[in-house]
Amino acid sequence: MIDNHMTKTLNLYEAKTRLSQLVEEAAAGEEIVIAKAGVPRARLVSLRRKKPTRRPGRARGRIWIAEDFDSPLPPKVLAAFWGGRKP
């Protein structure tokens, strides 16, 4: 659905002569429709995309965390992190 109060329709010739200005208007949120012989052919809109809506719980059942995930690391692994030195 197009919100008409933010949509501007121009013919192709006018759009070519005002392209730089139209790009700025589109970047500011306005939608510009370009028509050829009165028939809409293209739409110029901002590239800013809306952030996707977060849906908590989408990964439920796909992530597994071991019960001992926060247990101390084995001495060999801990030594590797410290380059053989004691922490």
Image (cartoon, rainbow, N blue to C red):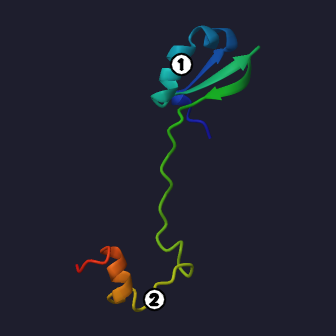
Q: Position of residue 61 (x, y in %)?
A: 56, 82
Residue 66 location (% of width, % of height) = 45, 88
Q: Residue at x 64, y 28 (%)?
A: 43
Q: Name the residue that disc number 1 marks.
A: 22
Q: Is residue 21 left or right of residue 9?
A: left
Q: Which residue is situated farthest in the left direction here?
A: 87
- The image quadrant that residue 85 belongs to is bottom left
In front of the other: 59 or 2: 59
Q: Are marks 2 and 1 in contact (CB under 8 Å)?
A: no
Q: Position of residue 47 (x, y in %)?
A: 54, 35
The quarter of the displayed image where residue 35 is located: top right
- The quarter of the rendered structure image containing the N terminus is top right
Give the SS element for disc 2. loop
Please tell me which residue is depicted at 33% across the width and 82% down the height of the picture. Answer: 78
Q: Earlier in the sequence, mark 2 or mark 1?
A: 1
Mark 2 sits on what residue? 66
The nearer-to-camera label among 2 and 1 is 2
Which quarter of the figure has residue 79? Answer: bottom left
Instruction: Give residue 1's mark.
Output: none
Residue 73 showing in the rendered view: no
Q: Is residue 53 above or below residue 80?
A: above
Is residue 76 in view from this perspective? yes
Amino acid bearing label 2: Ala
Q: Nearer the viewer, residue 12 or 74?
A: 74
Report the Cα–Cα distance between label 2 and label 1: 55 Å
Quadrant for the C terminus in the image: bottom left
Decide: is 48 above or below 40: below
Give the camera-side residue of 55 and 86: 86
Q: Residue at x 49, y 74 (%)?
A: 57
Residue 73, image x and y in percent?
Answer: 35, 86
